[in-house]
Image (cartoon, rainbow, N blue to C red):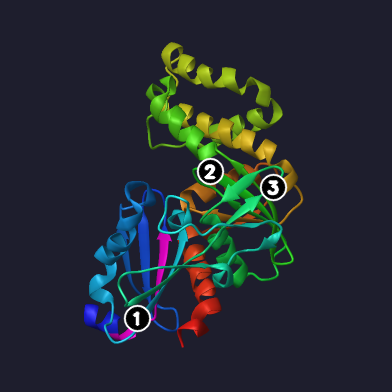
Amino acid sequence: MSDIIKDKLALVAVDWGTSNLRVWLLDAPGNVLGIRESEKGMGTLAQSEFEPALLDLIDGDLPFDRVTPVMCCGMVGSRQGWKEAGYMTVPCEAPGGAKATRAEVQDQRLALWIVPGVKQIGPDDVMRGEETQVAGFLAQNPDFDGVVCLPGTHTKWARISAKEIVSFQTFMTGELFALLSKQSVLRHSVNTAEFDGDVFRDALSDAMSRPQSIASKLFGLRAAHLVSDQSLSHGKSALSGYLIGMELAGARPYWLGMDIALIGAPALCDIYKDGLAAQGCFANTYSASDMTLAGLIAAFSDVRETLS
């Protein structure tokens, strides 16, 4: 199989986050020949260790008779990454290969670029990685005018118009959920994989109408578990509803009356879609992995001619 990949390999697309590394091996038409993954994220590597970490995954797939282009996005372009790729400032087009940073490599079989992130000045905000998902989405939906929501550890809401990221806002909802469910006293009352949609929607509505009471409501989840034997699924679903409800309340100027696209993990997008539907808003969902790959392919199209 490796010999087949060597013969057809035309692009290595890389999504390099803080905790994980994912690589797609593509042929010239953009078909996926193989996928490689590791836990060697940016957070585990010194600057000199990025190239060896990449080669650990793809060394056996690289041809020797030509240079293979590598297009990267994510935290690999941060100050602590392989090479800092800087930020574009909104309003701007979703970054592509034209603004990518060329990184030096030791292995002469590689030519490597890193897509820049996006920043906002007043109110200050940054994204790195999500901009490539937005670019991939716009490559497939060039006439979209509305809001792209990217649920995750740090959820982004980006206003899109005329193929540009006009503005965006970040909410630490995913990180708050992780901290409260795993490191707070609530961990004893929400530790389950089960999820109750009705409880989630009730809590979301409560948070949107009375956000000032949520700090008390959160402890109430622990108290209800101790005093009234409230189920773990009820606690987890309510916690999710409270946090996403506060987010939707804060992001209301972004989504109200807008076309909405959700890009992320399918299960998490479904939760956001359900929450938005409870507010009378319909959203289409897209895979984060698919949009990242589409964005990296689009970025490569900008630099393809530099290899010839």
Residue 275 falls in which quadrant of the image? Answer: top right
Q: Earlier in the sequence, mark 2 or mark 3?
A: 3
Q: Indicate whether 303 appears above or below 164.
A: below
Reading the image, the residue beneath label 1 is 9
- Seen at 28% across and 77% down, the residue is 62
Between marks 1 and 3, how big is the CA–CA gap?
Answer: 40 Å
Q: Earlier in the sequence, mark 2 or mark 1?
A: 1
Report the span colored magenta: 7-15
Q: Indicate whether 220 appears above or below 96.
A: above
Q: Nearer the viewer, residue 205 or 32?
A: 32
Q: Nearer the viewer, residue 159 or 126?
A: 126
Left or right position of 7 against 157 = left
Which numbered mark, 2 or 3, is in the foreground of this view? 3
Q: Indicate whether 212 appears above or below 258.
A: above
Left or right position of 36 against 170 = left
How would you rate the neighbour count of disc 2 (Cα within 10 Å): few for under 14, some for 14-19, many for 20 or more?
Answer: some
- Seen at 26% across and 75% down, the residue is 61
- Seen at 38% across and 22% down, the residue is 188
Element class at badge 2: loop
Whether residue 49 is visible: yes
Between marks 2 and 1, how big is the CA–CA gap?
Answer: 34 Å
Reading the image, the residue beneath label 3 is 121
Whether residue 1 is visible: no
Q: Earlier in the sequence, mark 1 or mark 3?
A: 1
Which residue type carries mark 3? Ile
- Seen at 66% across and 71% down, the residue is 142
How would you rate the neighbour count of disc 3 (Cα within 10 Å): few for under 14, some for 14-19, many for 20 or more?
Answer: few
* Residue 173, x across and y down, in percent: 54, 37
Residue 202 falls in which quadrant of the image? Answer: top right
